[in-house]
Amino acid sequence: MTMKWSEVTPEADYLNRRAFLAAGIAALATPALGLGGAPSAFSTDEAVNSLEDITHYNNFYEFGTGKSDPAQYSGSLKTSPWSVTIDGMVDRPGNYGVEDLAPESALEERIYRLRCVEAWSMVIPWLGVPLAGALDKAGVQPGAKFVAFRTLHDPEQMPGQRSRILDWPYREGLRLDEAMHPLTILATGLYGRVLPNQNGAPIRLVVPWKYGFKSIKSVVGITLTDTQPQCSWQMMQPGEYGFYANVNPQVDHPRWSQATERRIGKGLFGGRQDTLMFNGYGDQVAGLYAGMDLAKHY
Ligand code: MTE
């Protein structure tokens, strides 16, 4: 499927992008991006969630633990200038600007399912670039096996970091082959627009076959390493949140089932739908885990 969100979304569910731009709607106070990216063979043709859902039902604990907290409190985050430090086992360590890592001309539209470990899901039209290309700019060295990511740590701008709900900064990690997989992107936009703060502006990771907590927001650091990185949720509750965190309907969270999910926007009586292995991306990614016991490596 190579369709754009504007072609696959029921009319009532979205604002036509051109009308949206022409009207200059400032609801998000984020500028529109020129072309909104080329469609991708990796996109789903499922109906996308509304911009309202995507930007008002969020997890971003740096701004509070309530679903509406990020939309309410992330306005204070200063997203420009912003650079991402890439270091560790790379040939060209340094600070890379968001524009260098994800030039507007290179942005692709990727319509991905997002499945949160809390058993809700959405479909989001991201704009971004493959992480592999960004890492190539820094030149990954042969001995590197993992990629560690970290979010900005600044309690002045991120008031949620004043409480110790997590060991800040938020940290995540991937195996190098997962990071280099073409489905893995650095997103700088959604719905044809610059990424709203509550969704992880100015640049965040999106790994669609893993639970949403792997898709770390507002990234300031990427480190190539030969040891498995520490991840915030895993450090806090290792029995509940693993390093891999692949979406898997057969491996339940210790406190709830992962067999089904609630698609946001379907309403109170929308019912639940079956959760798909690897969130429906098994054809592309199952090979990464050949021979691994996924109940053990959850
Ligand atoms: N990244 C940071 N820095 N802080 C967070 O609290 N929450 C994660 C992930 N990335 C989180 C984060 C979780 S649990 C989910 S489900 C997704 O972001 C939600 O992304 P969205 O709000 O853009 O839908």
Image (cartoon, grey):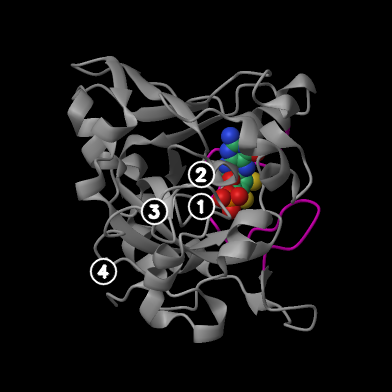
The nearer-to-camera label among 1 and 3 is 3
Identify residue for label 1.
210
Decide if residue 115 is in sight here. Answer: yes
Q: For this rendering, which residue is in front, 221 or 245?
A: 221
- Judge left or right: residue 255 versus residue 92: right
Eye-nearest disc, 1 or 4: 4
The structure residue drawn at horizontal position 49% and vertical position 39%, both measured from the top left corner, is 201
40 vs 30: above or below: below
Element carrying mark 2: loop
Label 2 neighbour load within 10 Å: few <14, some 14-19, many 20+: many
In the image, residue 248 lies in the stretch drawn in magenta: yes
**In 3D space, how far apart are the residues under numbered discs 1 and 4 (Cα atoms)?**
19 Å
Residue 215, which numbered label?
2
| Separation of residues labelled 4 and 2 (CA atoms) | 21 Å
| Left or right: 162 as drawn, with respect to 191 | right
Q: Nearer the viewer, mark 3 or mark 4?
A: 3
According to the image, label 3 marks what residue?
32
Image vertical order of residue 111 relative to residue 201, above or below: below
How far is the residue under mark 2 from the one under mark 1? 8 Å
Q: Which residue is mark 4?
A: 41
Q: Earlier in the sequence, mark 3 or mark 2?
A: 3
Kindly identify the residue that appears in the image at 39 percent across and 76 percent down: 6
- Tell me whether circle 2 and circle 1 mark residues in contact (CB < 8 Å): yes
Mark 3 and mark 4 lie on one chain; the one further toward the N terminus is 3
* Mark 3 residue element: loop
